[in-house]
Image (spheres, helix red, strand yellow):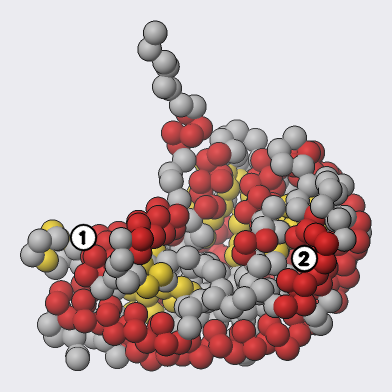
């Protein structure tokens, strides 16, 4: 008998992750001996700090390899509460925190916990590729609020207000932003908070995973710290970016107990507790000092140097537009001046995806199409690689772009 290969309508509604698709293609080329430079993924090139790694190793040696409580160890949740109090100015108790297998899981569980089918999830664009798809997985409707490069990709609060409806349930904010590196100033967040306060059903998910990767004079503000917003806000954070712990898979969510208990209930029937070993390592990360101490400060200094190189280099190319990142480790750059070019043996460059395929094919550099982030005029360049790697990548990209548009200065 033939097997019914039908998939659920929920799965059919979800788009594959563009980042992973590009990484898979680039990895295949690497395996074939092509010297591809990988600038598509948001993964720091630094090793996990030794004090964190040793804590994980010691956890294994000491037999700390069993299940923990579903929401995470009391020890770690207590340490997270202390961190949020000291660094973010927001107060929680351990029963208002759930530790998960990465911040992505925390976000998915939050959307599932607070949204019902037919609700709207408000997402400023450009956005992290997974936000709309997580909304679709929860049978909700992603509502995209456009921003502009001329306004540093910061959402116009008046436009936000105009787009809210009685179905609006969750606003997702990410600052510092993936993919743009924009940082929301406190004054703008306060204006957004005033609008949120007018809508009883509206909650805010504040994704603060890049909070420590920020370049002065920009400063991070936790949305839950604003007047009247603690009760409305689910704060998501983790250890992957600032502490170079992407493979450890550990994130967390904090918020009012009513909502956090719902997240914990979902996790109890989903993955249960996060890795006991990673939780011990996370404790060591939180012991490194305010905002990760000197170790994280050194990483941020390197990221800033890399950012400055890319901004200066691409700024010298005719027709290229950018907004200088204030945080994270991405440059979201407008290369639409090259669209419409015809390339022999390749076809027409008609958008960010075809441009990225062209640059992977001709320059052997893997980048993320901005279309996957809600803005097809741009591409995202991750500068979480060494300066030498970025210099070589720019050399290749510039040479490939010169083929498309000979007027670009050499």
User: In the displayed structure, would residue 295 be above or below residue 121?
Assistant: below
Q: Is residue 70 left or right of residue 174?
A: right
Numbered label attached to residue 393: none
Tell me what residue is drawn at x 73 percent, y 48 percent.
Answer: 200
- Tell me the crowding category of disc 2: few under 14, some 14 to 19, or many 20 or more residues within 10 angstroms, Cα based: many
Tell me what residue is drawn at x 41 percent, y 70 percent.
Answer: 38
Where is residue 28, by image quadrant? Answer: bottom left
Q: Residue 50 in the image: state x and y as whole percent.
A: 72, 78
Q: Quadrant of the N terminus?
A: top left
Q: Is residue 275 left or right of residue 346?
A: right
**Mark 2 vs mark 1, CA separation in Å:** 47 Å
Where is residue 174, by image quadrant? Answer: bottom right
Identify the secondary structure beneath mark 2.
Answer: helix
Seen from this angle, which residue lies furthest front? 61
Q: Residue 208 in the image: state x and y as whole percent.
A: 67, 67
Tell me what residue is drawn at x 66 percent, y 74 percent.
Answer: 48
Between 312 and 52, the residue placed more toward the observer is: 52
Q: Are marks 2 and 1 in contact (CB under 8 Å)?
A: no
Q: Residue 131 in the image: state x and y as whole percent.
A: 54, 52
Q: Residue 85 in the image: state x and y as whole percent.
A: 86, 72
Identify the secondary structure beneath mark 1.
Answer: loop
Q: Is residue 220 visible?
A: no
Q: Nearer the viewer, mark 2 or mark 1?
A: 2
| Residue under pointer 1 | 350
| Residue under pointer 2 | 56
């Amino acid at each position: 008998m033939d097997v019914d290969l039908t998939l659920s309508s929920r799965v059919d509604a979800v788009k594959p992750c563009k980042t992973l698709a590009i990484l898979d293609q680039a990895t295949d080329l690497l395996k074939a001996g092509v010297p591809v430079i990988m600038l598509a993924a948001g993964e720091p090139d630094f090793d996990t700090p030794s004090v964190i790694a040793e804590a994980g190793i010691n956890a294994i040696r000491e037999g700390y390899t069993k299940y923990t409580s579903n929401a995470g160890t009391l020890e770690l949740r207590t340490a997270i509460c202390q961190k949020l109090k000291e660094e973010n100015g927001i107060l929680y108790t351990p029963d208002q925190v759930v530790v998960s297998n990465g911040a992505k899981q925390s976000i998915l569980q939050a959307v599932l916990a607070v949204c019902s089918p037919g609700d709207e999830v408000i997402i400023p664009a450009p956005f992290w590729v997974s936000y709309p798809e997580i909304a679709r997985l929860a049978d909700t409707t992603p509502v995209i609020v456009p921003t502009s490069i001329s306004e540093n990709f910061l959402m116009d609060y008046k436009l936000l207000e105009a787009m809210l409806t009685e179905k609006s349930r969750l606003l997702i904010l990410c600052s510092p932003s993936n993919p743009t590196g924009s940082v929301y100033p406190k004054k703008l967040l306060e204006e957004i908070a005033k609008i949120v306060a007018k809508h009883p059903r509206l909650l805010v998910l504040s994704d603060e995973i890049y909070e420590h990767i920020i370049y002065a004079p920009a400063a991070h503000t936790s949305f839950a710290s604003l007047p009247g917003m603690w009760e409305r806000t689910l704060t998501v954070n983790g250890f992957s970016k600032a502490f170079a712990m992407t493979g450890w898979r550990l994130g967390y969510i904090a918020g009012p107990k009513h909502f956090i208990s719902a997240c914990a209930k979902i996790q109890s029937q989903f993955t249960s507790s996060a890795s006991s070993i990673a939780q011990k390592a996370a404790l060591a990360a939180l012991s490194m000092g305010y905002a990760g101490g000197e170790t994280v400060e050194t990483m941020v200094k390197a990221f800033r140097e890399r950012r400055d190189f890319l901004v200066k280099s691409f700024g010298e190319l005719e027709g290229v537009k950018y907004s200088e990142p204030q945080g994270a480790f991405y440059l979201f750059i407008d290369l639409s001046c090259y669209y419409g070019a015809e390339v022999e043996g390749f076809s027409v460059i008609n958008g960010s995806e075809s441009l990225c395929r062209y640059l992977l094919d001709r320059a052997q550099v893997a980048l993320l199409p901005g279309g996957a982030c809600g803005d097809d005029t741009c591409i995202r360049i991750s500068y979480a690689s060494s300066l030498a790697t970025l210099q070589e990548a720019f050399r290749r990209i510039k040479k490939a772009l010169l083929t498309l548009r000979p007027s670009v200065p050499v």
